[in-house]
Amino acid sequence: MIRWAIKHSLYVAALGFGGMVAWAVARPTVEGSGHAVTEERSIGSVSEVTLSGVGDVTIKQGDVASLRVTADDNILQLLVSESNGNKLRLSTRSSSMRPKTKIAYVVTVPQLDNLSVSGAGNVTVEKFTGDDLKVKLSGAGTATLRDVNYKELTLDLSGAGKATATGTATRTMFKLSGAGKIDATGLQSTSGEVRVSGAGYANVWAARELKANVSGAGGVRYKGTPQLEQKVSGAGSVRPLE
């Protein structure tokens, strides 16, 4: 009797698990309607932005924090924006969507200290001035920093993503693990440090000092005539840009 009860329980559990798997597999893809709508959403005084999933995010500097979202009208409701303290998180309720209208966010904040992108999203930071900005990119997304002015700027890439930066920075720290690429030849820095592990490449501009550490098959190419301190292991290299 006990043995039968155990077998029956296992059978019921297996049916339940199989049903959940079948539901997950059969969950339909949300097709975009093609009818684009724009929605204004209220956010707090945030200084950290996280994008998980898809979409194009443009971040601008302004006195009043705001968020504008554009998407198909039937997909807009699946786009989540959560503002908690100084953090804004942008994500989706569904992992299976086929939009016809490009998902676009426009974020306006007075200050930007941290930016994180995971997945295949794309983020552009427009003409920002501040003390310290840390950007973390994981996955195959892109980050574009356009005409920024920071005292400290950190770019941390893991995966196959790409980051581009222009403007000025007193000090920069660039970290690359994986097959990503950083193009910061348009970002003039006084001193910089680059750490590359894997097959990634970083092109940088340093006026006075540059520390470069490369392990693997990646490399560092630099602009300017800085005092160079380098350490290379593997097939990587550190060379001036031609």
Image: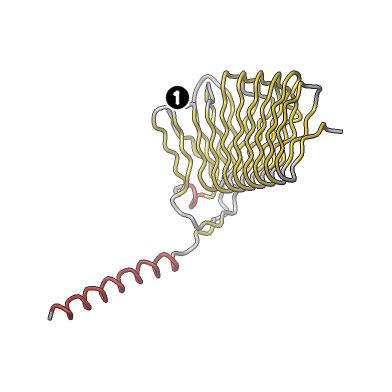
176 lies left or right of 10? right
x%, y% of residue 75?
A: 49, 51
5 lies left or right of 202? left
> Foreground residue, 137 or 193?
193
> Foreground residue, 190 or 89?
190
> Foreground residue, 166 or 5?
5
Residue at image point 69% right, 46% down: 199
Q: In the orientation shown, which residue stands out farthest toward the right?
A: 242
122 w.r.t. 209: above or below: below
Residue at image point 59% right, 54% down: 100
Q: Quadrant of residue 210?
A: top right
175 w.r.t. 45: above or below: below
Q: Quadrant of residue 211?
A: top right
Q: How many marks?
A: 1
200 w.r.t. 224: above or below: below
Q: For mark 1, does the 10 Å Cα neighbourhood hold few (<14), some (14 to 19), or many (20 or more) residues?
A: many
Question: Residue beneath label 1, please?
Answer: 45
Q: Quadrant of residue 27?
A: bottom left
At label 1, the amino acid type is: Ser
Residue at image point 57% right, 44% down: 138
x%, y% of residue 47?
A: 49, 26
